[in-house]
Amino acid sequence: MKPPIPSTRSAKAVSACLSAALLAAGCGGVAPAGSTGGDAFSYAIRSDPGLLDPAQVQNTTTYTALSLAYDTLVHTGPDGRTIPGLAEKWSVTPASVTFTLRPGTTCSDGSPVTASTVAANVAHLTDPATKSPAYGVVVPEGLTAEADDDARTVTLSTPEPFAFILRSTRYLFVVCGAGLRDRALLRSGTSGSGPFRLTSAEPGQSYTFARREDYTWGPDGATTADPAMPGSVVLRVVGSEATAANLLLSHQLNGAQLTGPDRARVTGVPGITTSDQANGTQEFLFHQGAGHPGSDPAVRRALLQAVDLGSLGAIATGGTGRAPTGLVMVPRPCPGDTVTGRLPAYDPRAAASALDTAGWHRGPGGVRVKDGRKLTVRMIYGASSGETMAAAAEYLAEAWRTAGAEVRLRAVSDAAYGEVEAVTQDWDVNWAPLGVTLPTQLLGALSGPFTPDGGNFAHLTNDRYERLTAEASRLPDATGCALWQRSEHALLDSADIVPVVDKTVTTAAHSATFRITSGLFDPTSIRMTGGRT
């Protein structure tokens, strides 16, 4: 994922969703459920979850862990539909959504979950004193909540229309009971209404969650009554994918997600089921500020014609990627292919001709020059992105050198990325995977005030995009999809953003089945299969 962007609220909101919350869509392999309920389900997480307060989540692993213990108002079903969670029904307007809560839901300490409970969560998240990374991401800016406990309704409202106000609540973990009164309890514990509760925490090693026997209000009314459901879930901190693969192969894990070459070791192995899912789009952007070569749309298009994007994507993912079809991750609210055919086709001769026409002519050493200035392209990418990303950067640089550019590559650490990207802005091309699940989450990064005053780090000015998104933002949920799709076309037609390839993640399961979507478990989907696959 793209390292965080420091700066204003808009930039913070975008960076939080990019770097923290909105990971991969994935699901466990399908196998018949057995009758070995009560067993522990062991799953590998890549890093320690850290602080367990849902209002302070700053990484994907924490979201994964908390999804076991906390309910949300709605869930995402296997087919991408929004389905009931704590709320049994809802009504939506462009600037509000009213939820009717299920009766009889309780916290893990036995206290009731009420409309006021939900409202208190919203109030805490939106309180400036909380300084929640979720504010502006999980909950829209300016969100308010009005509760009616007698009617079991809570209405969430925004000052301006917010198209996906309903879908955004699938990341709103509802804290209840003692944890709502004393947030200090959430530093290393849980206080939620979910089907599991944290019973043991060994930082850096493992986290154990015990099943609640009284749970009956899961997605679409799911319960914990199935005897094949595990008695506990153990999240083991396994930083190395090679180690995770070894533990799966030696049957010491029931599940893990793998994105690197070690996934091949667990695929096709008897006793292990696997499935591959999209895991976010890899893309790059040209800096369009004054003095940058990308400020000229003719140069942007010419540099794209000089690159075989298919080969670039294969290198960036080690051959495991897929052709991109959109800028929003699965399960995207607006299905369809907005990418195919929108970017310039690979044509080195046309690229050379276009650069000549734009006034960039080859000088000494073959580097193109215009008005005494070399065509210099400084590209940055994440140093933590691995060997395949480094190889992709070299491939891209070689293609542009062949076209006549002087290319300088720079691998930037996660810690330094925000400074280089938003403050010094010492770059012309930025390989910046955005990793969002709602099109509204792109707005702060692709429009509005430029960095360092805002989140628009590539200094984009696309009037068509801004007009279409402004219109789409006033329409609730999928009713604005045609406009959102056209807004993506506007970006691609102007070469404002270049989706290269969709990464994939392999979800592997041994003696179990489960579903995990956008980094969140569906806890009631976990089943132990007794070794049958």
Image: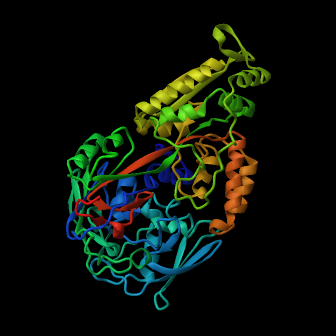
In-front residue for pair 31/332: 31
Q: Is residue 425 visible?
A: no
In-front residue for pair 298/516: 516
Q: Is residue 451 visible?
A: yes
Percent x, y of residue 119:
47, 77
Residue at 27% in and 70% down: 229
Percent x, y of residue 430:
56, 35
How many numbered marks does the figure carry? 0
Determine which quarter of the picture holds residue 384. top left
Percent x, y of residue 227:
25, 75
Determine which quarter of the picture holds residue 493. top right
Percent x, y of residue 530:
22, 63
Residue at 67% in and 61% down: 481
Left or right position of 382 against 304: left
Above or below residue 218? Residue 323 is above
Left or right position of 427 against 352: left
Residue at 50% in and 90% down: 151
Residue at 69% in and 42% down: 341
In-front residue for pair 369/45: 45
Residue lying farthest top? 364
Residue lying farthest bottom? 150
Above or below residue 29? Residue 112 is below
Above or below residue 247? Residue 106 is below
* Quadrant where the C terminus is found in the figure: bottom left
Determine which quarter of the picture holds residue 121. bottom left
Left or right position of 417 against 157: left
* Colour treatment of the image: rainbow
Left or right position of 84 against 532: right
